[in-house]
Structures are given as structure tokens and as C-alpha cells.
Image (cartoon, rainbow, N blue to C red):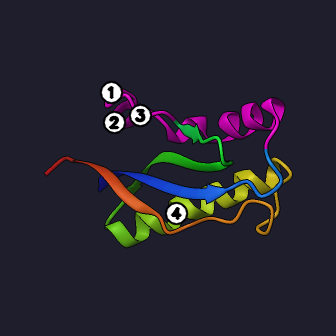
Amino acid sequence: MTTFVITVPGTFVTGITDTSRAALEGKLSAQHTDVSESEGLDLLTLNDDDTFSIRLEVDATDRYEAELEAVGLVSSALQETGYSETEAPLGSPAVTGIDSDL
């Protein structure tokens, strides 16, 4: 099994409040651990134009599985925080780090 750091970009069409941001970070914090923290990566980067990047660690057998899981986790967390797919559309995920036991 390999640990991947996956970056999922997106845009908050309706903006995001500090309360919603904290709730979103809380829901995703378990997926932001050793690898990403040791590299100094923020869990959520929010830009002035309401675009964002979320960086998660996912254990998977390959890149494709890791990207699918990361997008699923981000989508679920956004929905639980009150954002629909149209209010916070996601872009294509990208592998931004790999930690393997090989």
C-alpha cells in the first residue's frame, strides 16, 4: 500500500464563511497527517477569487484509486458542510506526493 498526497482543486461559487471553512477542515483533518504536514502543506488553501486547493493523504494501491478516494472524501465533506456540487465544483485531482514502503 502506498500513501498518496492528492490535491483536489475547486471553486466556491457562493463564497465561504469562516465557520464553514473550519467545519470543512474539521471533516477532512484525519486525512491530513504525517506526509503532508512534514512537507509543510496546508490542508486547505483558499485564494482571493474563491478558488481552493485541498490536500489529502490517501492510502491506495495506485494513483487512480487514490485520486478517486480523495475526490469522494472532498465531495462528501463539502456536502456535509452545506455545499452542493454546483456551489463548489471540483477540478481534476493531482498527485502531489507519494510515500511508499517499497
Question: Horizontally, is 91 left or right of 40 in the view?
Answer: right
| Residue to which mark 1 is pinned | 38
Above or below, comparing residue 95 to residue 20 in the picture: below
Position of 38 with respect to 49 (left or right) is: left
Are discs 2 and 3 less than 8 Å apart at CB?
no
Q: Residues within 10 Å of mark 4 (few under 14, many from 20)?
A: some
Find numbered disc 4 in the image and state the secondary structure of the residue it sits on. Answer: helix
Q: Earlier in the sequence, mark 4 or mark 1?
A: 1
User: Where the N terminus falls, by quadrant?
Assistant: bottom left
Please state which of the two labelled residues, at mark 2 or mark 3, is closer to the viewer: 3
Q: Residues within 10 Å of mark 1 (few under 14, many from 20)?
A: few
Q: Nearer the viewer, residue 86 or 78?
A: 86
Marks 4/3 in contact by CB < 8 Å: the verdict is no
Q: Main secondary structure of the magenta part?
A: helix
Q: Mark 3 or mark 2, which is nearer the start of the sequence? A: 2
Find the distance from the CA under tag 3 to the CA under tag 1.
8 Å
First in sequence: mark 4 vs mark 3 = 3
Residues at circles 2 and 1 in contact by the CB criterion of under 8 Å: yes
- The residue under label 4 is which amino acid type? Glu
- Amino acid at the residue labelled 2: Val
Q: Nearer the viewer, mark 3 or mark 1?
A: 3
Look at mark 3 in the image and give the residue it sits on: 41
CA distance separating discs 4 and 3 = 19 Å
Q: CA distance from mark 4 to mark 1?
A: 22 Å
